[in-house]
Amino acid sequence: MQKLPIGAWAQDGVNFLTQFFENQFRFVSDSIASIIEKFISLLMWFPPLAFIITSLILIFIVKRSIKNILVISFCFLAILNLGYWEETLETMTLVLFATLISTFVGIPIGILCAHHSFIYAIMRPVLDLMQTIPTFVYLIPTLMLFGLGMAPGLISTIIFAMPAVIRLTYLGISNVPHALLEVADSFGANSWKKLSSVEIPHAWQSIKTGISQCMMLSLSMVVVAALVGADGLGKPVVQALNTVNISKGIESGMTIVFVAILLDRIFANSSQKIGAVR
Amino acid sequence: MIEHFKIEQLDLVFGKNSKKVFQALDAGQSREHIHQELKHVIAVQNVNFSVYKSEILVIMGLSGSGKSSLLRCLNGMNGRTIGKTRGQILYLDAETNQRINLIECPKNHLRKIRKHQVSMVFQQFGLMPWRTVSENVAFPLEIQGIKSTERIKQVEEKLEIVGLAKWKSHYPHELSGGMQQRVGLARAFVTQADVLLMDEPFSALDPLIRKQLQDEILELQQKFKKTIIFVTHDFSEAIKIGSRIAIMDAGKILQIGTPQDIIENPACENVKRFTEDIKGTHTFLT
């Protein structure tokens, strides 16, 4: 029996893209890399302790919780002590950019999906594919198109993490009670007003959950991103794996855990408070 | 008396293929037949009535009689995206002082009417849980594009009228049902609309609060002379509030008249059934 030519098609598609659009892809890749590198060098310009103290103060102003501050400062100091400050900043930058892009692209897609059932019908299998296809599989084409470095790492991360934002935005918007939309309608609201003052506020908790999940999923991609040459905490993990270096592996692995706790404590929303109001 | 609304031969159909249903209706097929054969619901069928300026017209009927659907035709919420209407809903536009047919008028115009001239009060209050009382009342003014300083002034004025000035920075869930509906009333009043559409506004409230709000609505009506179309399934509420009552069943209006009219001369058996319960308890009317 004849094999389905999926592999051949994908190969042809990627070949076609590399052949005719290589310069464009490289341009995108280079600009992404240069923006990220500039951002990282800006963060590196601060002395680590000054950076930590400033962020602690800012976090305290927003969160007003001593317990949080203690956990966060422990994580920061542990990272600094283990000597992975630069890698941590690189990873955080990657996570931040991946989350920002996923948010700004994902929320509108989620809203469109909730408003038009045919768009959701198209997006559903695409989202399933984005989340389930093994990451290594699309590393090869992204590598061919964007070359080694931060850009393919960022793009793979976005592919993996963005569905969370889309799905939870979709969920939040499609759960808006009909009665509230009717109220907006009855007072003559147009679709923009309905979106901005009924649908998004109602879905806000769900959207925020999507964003924080997206952030955690991005972090879980650091090791994979390192395989395509992205800087960050994934690199020492990969090196440790290649050289069977147990102590390095544990150190860098624990640092990733500390970063995860940090991100969770800093960005996990104080949703309990607002949730109770409902 | 000036006719604020004049409704002529109004049909409202829910379902995808309204054209076919209208044809079937014209061929004289019954509502039940269309429901079974074509799987379409005829919510309102061949309805004719007028609403006069500054009266309270109560549309009364059991659940499923089409009364709420009919009410939603009067601001065009039914008949465009939800359901399809045909016939005429002539509305006296306060701005131009001309009659326009709401079924055919452009969407923008309809939106303008909803913004400024016709506002609505809902059975489940329809308050937004993430907005405070005053933010909820300000919502229609936001849609009108009124500046925030002016909004605050008007909102406070309206909250004063419904007696909730002290509660302005609370959230809806902190209020009792009766107070929540007062917020709903303030929100409907804040637009300066001449027409209020009220969809079973007091049905979710307990009897004492209901009575209180009924009295308040009558008082407000005395003061501000709004045209109110009030939907209810409660006949005693209808005779208390209504200047006139329209009794609906199965999408049709069975009888329309003053409360006294309806109690003394019920047009058919179905109407009689509503009035019989009431006759004993409200002897003052006879």
Image (cartoon, coloured by chain):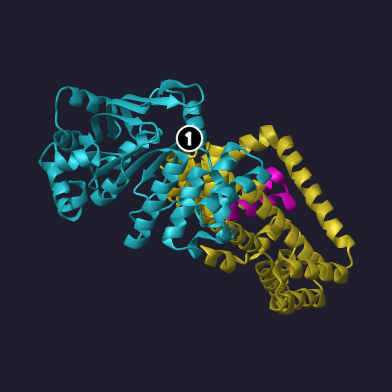
Q: Identify which amino acid the numbered label 1 is placed on.
A: Arg
Shown colour of chain B: cyan
Count of marks placed on residues: 1
Q: Is residue A195 above or below residue A82?
A: above
Instruction: Give the left or right position of residue B191, taking residue A33 as reference.
Output: left
Q: Chain of mark 1?
A: B
> Where residue B92 sits: x, y (%)?
42, 25
> Where residue B147 sits: x, y (%)?
66, 41
Task: Report if residue B225 lies within the magenta region.
Answer: no
- What segment is highlighted magenta in the picture? A143-164
Q: The chain shown in yellow is which?
A: A
Q: Is residue A166 visible?
A: no
Front position in the image: B23 or A213: B23
> Where residue A44 sits: x, y (%)?
86, 61
- Residue to which mark 1 is pinned: B114
Label 1 neighbour load within 10 Å: few <14, some 14-19, many 20+ = many
Residue at 55% from the left image edge and 56% from the top image edge: B133
